[in-house]
Image (spheres, rainbow, N blue to C red):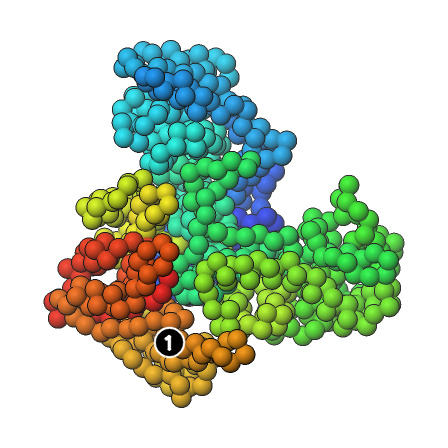
């Protein structure tokens, strides 16, 4: 199915394809204005020989053909994929031969650490691993590696992982072994190329999993790339990463593991780039499950991935999945509604009542959606005994008039009312009480996750906005907003929000090392390495954002670079908002009157608004005074917000001095010693986040890199807030 939203492609087009559980969506987006031009969807091809890649190809062909998009107009094409995740969950991976290495007295420890054994991927699913160990006290030769590789191949290995103790410092043996594998036409992964972190056991496990999915992922990538080339598209194919960015296909061929969980990451990418959320909770509601994530200061939260309960060296967006959504089925017992989900209409093979023809004489039936389920799920039969429909949270939201006009979740009110009347009679409730109960049960699974994310990310519970995406957003988000007493917004084109996220995602790379007491030179070197990596994949060198953070507990220094391709650099075409409109928006965001809001600083690109709020605690005995702040761009979008912050306006030549003054003013001492504030620098059109660093000199060193690009008298605005 395809919907054409515009027919003129005079400017560059970005294409994004998102693989969902039920459908694969493709969208065409104007590269400069972010206008959605066209969208299409096909059924996700889980069971095809080519896997979900076939659906990606079909969706792309349909979008190009029916919407008449010229291949020359396509400046960017990318897709997310569930193939890596599905392969691990289903055990559809290649047996792996592991070559472990180590030297000296600790060789026996390296032998143990490089043998992951029978690696559990998911309950009942295991990866077959064959292990050989080479003592590198005496430097191994190419012939030694060839002999071991052939032995492992004879045993049954289809891909190979090579891992040596301390290879992050001395990778020569791993590289020699990988080159030997390439000579033999074998697929291989070197541990030091997957991660530069110490921890031989985890690094080996990560390399093994990466190797296990190489054959299938490369086959899929070649099919998709061939389709792009045959279509005449000159732009390189990009693949969605688990951290919300994209990488080119060459990078994916080396590290397919990075595509794990790229589907949920696409929605978060859309939240930050398309919806331009700086702070809030993003709730992407599908048919079976809901993905919830927090965004603070324009950045999402990350966590270490786990497979089979074991940690691996892979950072993914912290997206928390809840087993309830727009198509979840209610459950009843002893005349009461007792639960919603986890089964959905899609899993049960039923249609939503909302999207049915008029159901004049519905009958309530209790069913087990699939074999082994309890027979307590509520379904609807019509004119015969066979259940073909079901009431869902989408239906309940329609009945309570929570679905906006024109939303994709809007349904047939005749059928909805008739079915809720029938359900009410069955459990002795009014139709409204039934709808309220269904949504209350569904919301009860989401609210603890939302509250936890708000607390963990130090968001202001009183002002946090809930942003809804996904085809089922209207089914849950308005009700959740009411339950949490929060503002909410539903995304435009919510049904294809993840595909839009893929289309607009930035090229991204993360470089991380474990360095005790990193020097400024160490930090700048990692920063440069991350920048070089995204430039090599096609990012515009003049528009790259780099965030550096240091984890004091693990001594990990991490530099993440992201940027758009030169052909698709974004130009803000939104009309400038008036000062009055911006003041009103800020007041609503802070939940105060417009009269209390003050414009405290501005430059050509941004305006900074602040206020003073007084809150009383302990029955009024203690008064807390905070200075909330909002940074808005010229169009009136909130780009940055803080609960309590200070602002300083200065010049590029004096910014280092101003950073010192602000830092000393807001620093405080605690049990862990001196804590410096988070510093964000508005330098020209860039928002430079310096909040991931540990000391003042590191902050000033990274700030100088950006400041050196500006004229000495250029206006610079600094925002400092407590962490």
Image x and y of residue 423, in percent? 82, 65
Image x and y of residue 599, in percent? 31, 82
Q: Residue at x 50, y 45 (%)?
A: 261
Dot 1: element: loop
Instruction: Out of 564 and 27, give the one closest to the viewer.
Output: 564
Asked which quadrant contains residue 161, the reply is top left
Relative to 325, does residue 167 appear above or below in the rendering? Answer: above
Give the mark count. Answer: 1
466 with respect to 645 (left or right): right
| Circle 1 Cα neighbour tier, 10 Å, few/some/many (<14 / 14–19 / ≥20) | some
The quarter in which the C terminus is drawn is bottom left
Asked which quadrant contains residue 692, the reply is bottom left
Q: Residue at x 64, y 65 (%)?
A: 475
Image x and y of residue 189, in percent? 39, 28
Residue 516 appearing in the image: yes
The quarter in which the N terminus is drawn is bottom right
Instruction: Out of 344 and 295, give the one closest to the viewer.
Output: 295
Residue at far bottom of view: 595
631 with respect to 489 (left or right): left
15 with respect to 633 (left or right): right
Instruction: Out of 68 and 700, give the one closest to the viewer.
Output: 700
Instruction: Out of 690 and 326, give the one closest to the viewer.
Output: 690
Residue 574 appearing in the image: no
Q: Residue at x 30, y 64 (%)?
A: 667
Q: Residue at x 35, y 25 (%)?
A: 165
Image x and y of residue 688, in percent? 28, 61
Disc 1 marks which residue?
627
494 with respect to 187 (left or right): right
């Amino acid at each position: 199915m395809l919907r054409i939203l515009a027919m003129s492609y005079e400017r560059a087009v970005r294409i994004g394809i998102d693989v969902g559980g039920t459908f694969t969506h493709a969208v065409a987006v104007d590269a400069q204005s972010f206008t959605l031009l066209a969208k299409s969807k096909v059924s996700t091809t889980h069971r095809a020989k080519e896997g979900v890649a076939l659906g990606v190809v079909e969706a792309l062909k349909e979008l190009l053909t029916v919407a008449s998009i010229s291949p020359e107009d396509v400046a960017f094409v990318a897709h997310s994929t569930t193939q890596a995740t599905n392969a691990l969950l289903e055990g559809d991976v290649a047996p792996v031969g592991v070559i472990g290495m180590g030297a000296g007295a600790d060789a026996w420890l390296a032998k143990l650490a490089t043998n992951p054994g029978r690696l559990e991927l998911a309950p009942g699913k295991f990866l077959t691993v064959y292990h050989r160990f080479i003592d590198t006290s005496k430097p191994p030769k190419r012939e030694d590696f060839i002999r071991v590789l052939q032995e492992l191949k004879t045993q049954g290995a289809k891909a190979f992982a090579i891992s040596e103790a301390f290879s992050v410092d001395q990778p020569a043996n791993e590289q020699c072994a990988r080159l030997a594998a390439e000579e033999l036409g074998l697929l291989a992964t070197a541990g030091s190329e997957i991660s530069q972190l110490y921890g031989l056991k985890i690094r080996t496990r990560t390399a093994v999993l990466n190797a296990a999915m190489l054959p299938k992922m490369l086959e899929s990538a070649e099919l998709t790339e061939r389709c792009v080339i045959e279509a005449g598209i000159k732009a390189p194919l990009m693949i969605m990463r688990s951290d919300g960015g994209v990488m080119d296909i060459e990078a994916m061929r080396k590290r397919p593991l990075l595509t794990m969980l790229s589907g949920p990451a696409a929605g978060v990418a859309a939240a930050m780039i398309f919806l331009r959320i700086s702070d809030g909770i993003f709730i992407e509601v599908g048919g079976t499950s809901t993905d919830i994530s927090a965004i603070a200061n324009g950045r999402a939260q990350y966590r270490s991935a786990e497979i089979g309960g074991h940690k691996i060296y892979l950072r993914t967006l912290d997206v928390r999945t809840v087993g309830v959504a727009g198509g979840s089925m209610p459950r009843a017992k002893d005349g009461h509604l007792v639960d919603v989900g986890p089964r959905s209409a899609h899993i049960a093979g039923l249609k939503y009542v909302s999207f049915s023809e008029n159901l004049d004489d519905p009958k309530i039936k209790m069913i087990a959606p699939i074999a082994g389920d309890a027979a307590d799920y509520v379904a609807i039969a019509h004119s015969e005994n066979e259940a073909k429909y079901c009431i869902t949270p989408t239906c309940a939201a329609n009945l309570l008039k929570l679905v906006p006009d024109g939303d994709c979740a809007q349904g047939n009110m005749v059928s909805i009312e008739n079915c809720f009347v029938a359900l009410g009679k069955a459990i002795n409730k009014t139709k409204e009480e039934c709808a309220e109960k269904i949504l209350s049960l569904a919301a009860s699974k989401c609210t603890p996750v939302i509250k936890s994310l708000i607390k963990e990310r130090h968001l202001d519970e009183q002002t946090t906005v809930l942003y809804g995406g996904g085809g089922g957003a209207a089914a849950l988000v308005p009700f959740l907003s009411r339950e949490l007493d929060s503002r909410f917004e539903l995304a435009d084109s919510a049904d294809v929000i993840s595909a839009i996220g893929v289309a607009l995602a930035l090229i991204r790379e993360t470089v991380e090392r474990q360095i005790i007491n990193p020097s400024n030179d160490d930090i700048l070197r990692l920063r440069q390495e991350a920048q070089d990596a995204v430039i090599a994949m096609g990012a515009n060198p003049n528009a790259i954002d780099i965030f550096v953070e240091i984890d004091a507990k693990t001594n990990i220094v991490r530099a993440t670079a992201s940027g758009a391709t030169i052909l698709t650099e974004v130009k803000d075409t939104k009309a400038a908002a008036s000062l009055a409109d911006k003041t009103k928006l800020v007041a609503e965001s802070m939940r105060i009157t417009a009269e209390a809001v003050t414009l405290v600083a501005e430059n050509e690109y941004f305006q900074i608004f602040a206020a003073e709020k007084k809150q009383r605690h302990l029955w009024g005995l203690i008064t807390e005074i905070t200075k909330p702040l909002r940074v808005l761009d010229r169009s009136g979008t909130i780009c940055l917000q803080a609960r309590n912050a200070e602002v300083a306006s200065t010049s590029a030549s004096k910014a280092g001095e101003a950073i010192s003054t602000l830092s000393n003013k807001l620093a405080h001492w605690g049990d862990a010693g001196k804590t410096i504030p988070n510093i964000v620098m508005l330098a020209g059109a860039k928002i430079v986040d310096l909040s991931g660093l540990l000391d003042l000199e590191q902050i000033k060193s990274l700030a100088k890199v950006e400041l050196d690009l500006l004229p000495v008298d250029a206006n610079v605005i600094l925002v400092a807030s407590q962490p």
